[in-house]
Amino acid sequence: MTTVRTPAGWPATEEEARAVQDALRAKVVLDEPGPPPGTGHVTGVDVAYDDERDVVVAAAVVLDAATLAVVAESTAVGRVSFPYVPGLLAFREIPTVLAALKALPCAPGLVVCDGYGRAHPRRFGLASHLGVLTGLPTIGVAKNPFTFTYDEPAAPRGSTAPLLAGTEEVGRALRTRDAVKPVFVSVGHRVSLDNACAHTLALAPAYRLPETTRRADALCRRALREAARALTAD
DNA sequence: GCGACAG
DNA sequence: ATCTTGTCGC
């Protein structure tokens, strides 16, 4: 597991962090469809915390998009680089996630993030931020609607409803299982919203959450437990 | 001003 | 995110 520290010049205040988002937002690419679902690699990234010990662990798990088989995985440990502030989640997760992505032995392909992309107060959530920093196609799949509104999608798996900021569609509520609470999909970087939803559905054949997030979540939790055990052992 | 608020 | 046992159901 690779170790990272907070990058020099990392925002120290909420005001600085918002300024970074406002500056980087112009670099987001929204006019590319992105890779076709079911081809190449799809990579899930997730993070687990131990605020008590000031430890954060990120995991990246690469799947074969056609079979959903695990192709490669990596983890990285770091220090908590920012407190949790709604709208500024990226500053808490990104340094360690970047390290995990860099530690992968192969190309990540499409990156699936836990959280939002365009569905964000300043249209620059975690997935957008990670996309701009890496140049990779990214999408966000969140478990909650944040502050946005939506009408309940129809009951069958595959049904969608717009996720709205006022009248602007910033993402989509996507039903991945019949009659089960939808997930909330938004575009990160270099992927269309239609394609982001198609990928998410293809990645969730059996459970509400995409296999990418499930795998990354399980891996970073296990790695965090092991890291905490190592710190306690001495 | 107050509360809500991805993880 | 994280704290946490059993339990109902396929």
Image: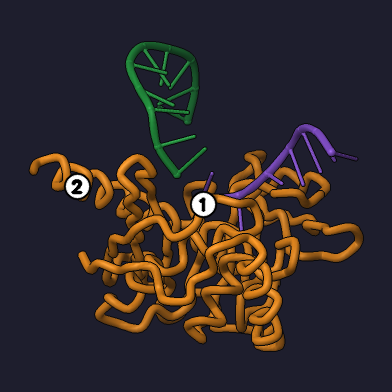
Chain colours: A orange, B purple, C green
Q: Is residue A38 visible?
A: yes
Q: Position of residue A1 (x, y in %)?
A: 20, 64
Please name whichever residue, A206 or A216, is drawn nearer the observer in this view of the structure: A216
Which-is-in-front pick, marks 1 and 2? 1
Vertical comparison of A86 with A99: above or below: above
Question: Which quadrant of the figure has residue A232?
Answer: top left
Report the front residue among A14 and A153. A14
Residue A202 in sight = no
Residue drawn at 30 percent across, 65 percent down:
A70
Disc number placed over residue A54 in the picture, else none: none
Q: Secondary structure at mark 2?
A: helix
Q: Which residue is mark 2?
A: A226
- Badge 2, how many Cα within 10 Å: few under 14, some, many 20+? few
Chain containing mark 2:
A
Q: Residue at x 46, y 61 (%)?
A: A93
Q: Percent x, y for residue A14?
A: 63, 60
Label 1 is placed on what type of residue?
A: Pro
Q: In the structure shown, which secondary structural element does the residue marked by tag 1 occupy?
A: loop
Outermost residue toward the left in this view: A234
The residue to which callout 1 is attached is A83
Seen in the picture, residue A62 relative to A107 is either above or below; the reply is: above
Residue at 32% x, 53% y is A220
- The answer to whether residue A204 is left or right of residue A54 is right
Task: Compare residues A206 and A9 and report the one nearer the observer.
Answer: A9
